[in-house]
Image (cartoon, rainbow, N blue to C red):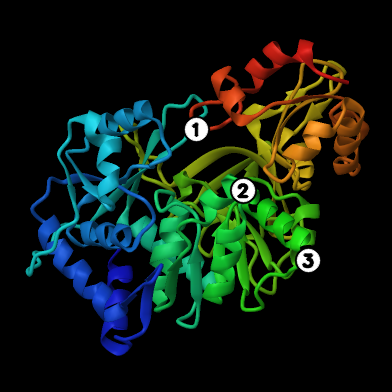
Amino acid sequence: MREVLAGLARNALHTPSRPAVIDGESILTYAQLETRIRHAAGWAVGLPQTVGLIGDKCADWIIADLALACAGKTVVPLPEFFSAEQLAHIAADAGVEHIVLATPEAAEQVEFLGIPATPISFDDFLVAGSPSRRIIYTSGSTGKPKGVRLSGRQIETSVRVLARAGAASDCDRHLSILPFALLLEQIAGIYVPIRVGATIDLASGALAGLMRGDPGPLLGAMSRSAATTTVIVPEILSGWVASLSNLGGAAPGTLRLVAVGGAPVSPALAERAWELGIPVHEGYGLSECCSAVAVNRPGERVAGTVGRPLDGISVMIDEGEIVVSGPTVMDGYTGAPDSGGTWRTGDLGNLVDGRLVVHGRKDSMIVTSLGRNVHPEWIEAMVLADPRIARCILTGGGPYPLAVLVPSPAGRDWFARADAGMIDALIAETCSAAPDYARPARHIVSDEADLIRNGLLTPNGRPRRDVIMRRLSSSSHG
């Protein structure tokens, strides 16, 4: 983190009045941000070595995060969207001794842990600490998060190569939409902008608005901020595209780079986004590799790929599996041996002219009763190109796949009126580019709450495909 903190100090010295963080009506200049971080680090030096950090998206989250890093602490972001059981597991697994609250309201979420929790505070001195570390918890398929051990060196390298790949500069204004507890947003939404002297604009209510079917906060933030960059997931992209299509609008002309990762992006959705002025650039990564492995660079995007590997990162394909080596690969999981600088991702893919194409998870491959292999993420991305669908889960159990559909807020009325034939036609239309054996011939319409209640999703929202296949195949339409 030394390079990020050095960038902060440099920007505070040379451009002290430039806006660093915009949080609603509040604006922190680089001089103000550097002063608050320096003073908060003086307070943080007195905390135990391993510190949890929790709270909503706000400027104090950024201050606390960088202050803890400056003080040489091991930082453990606590995702506010994790369950109580998961938070308890993280605290025990990482050995969290103290929790810093970015927002006072977060105290209620961690009170049951019995760990001292205090809001960020400020002192007037700074004692240099040892190099900082970070433990990021991923949402494992079993629902029990795994702790990814990352050093300052790995994060610094990721920040440096991402800034270069995205041509980041002090002219950028990054609209921060994703939660700060996600490593990708920490790196792309905090560290890269601060390193280059850009402005971070917090769109605090945009994600929550989209999830409840209200695109207003996102569209308003985009219009107000004159953003040049942002990082989103396909679900946000789908909602954004649907909103602009319904309103007959277009994305702000200031945007130059919208990085999309976390899941496959349907080519049809990406194409429609470009038509609406959203400059989509697909990327691929995972926490075990410091969040980013490959990305489509501005001016070099090739549709259907996630771009070339980042500088210094080696990607090879071993029997169809993506294997990553290089300086951003994690030290290892908590309580497990070191990785040795190489990570077998468990994802399937191939390289085309040096660009990576991702097919899906190795362990999620569906084999139909006709003996055909289907990558579910491939078909799911096709279905999700329709804005009426918020989630699609593909599973097997017959000659053709079964699709579990969750309507989006924008599509609930349509699904309420639609009969089985209309839904079958919708699926057929979205999957028209897929071979016949891979197209879902059966479907079930559900909602997220029912899927969780019936144990068909992990607590983190990942599908339990085998459970879905056993429980729902007999009740499907088609």
Q: Which mark is residue 316?
A: 2
Q: Is residue 316 above or below residue 245?
A: above
Measured along the vertical axis of the image, is residue 4 above or below residue 399? Answer: below
The N terminus lies in quadrant: bottom left
Placement of 238 over or under 370, stated as above or below: below
Earlier in the chain: of badge 2 and badge 3, it is 3
Q: Do the numbered discs 2 and 1 sit on residues whose CB atoms are within 8 Å?
A: no
Q: Residue furthest bottom?
A: 14
Q: Are marks 1 and 3 in contact (CB under 8 Å)?
A: no
Circle 1 residues within 10 Å: few <14, some 14–19, many ≥20: some
* Residue 227 visible (yes or no): no
Q: How much space separates mark 2 and mark 3, taking CA atoms?
A: 43 Å
Mark 1 or 3: the one toward you: 3
Q: Earlier in the sequence, mark 1 or mark 3?
A: 3
Name the residue nearer the viewer: 303 or 250: 250
Nearer to me, 388 or 392: 388
User: What kind of element bears circle 1?
Assistant: loop
82 left or right, relative to 237:
left
* Residue linked to disc 3: 248
Mark nearer the viewer, 2 or 3 = 3
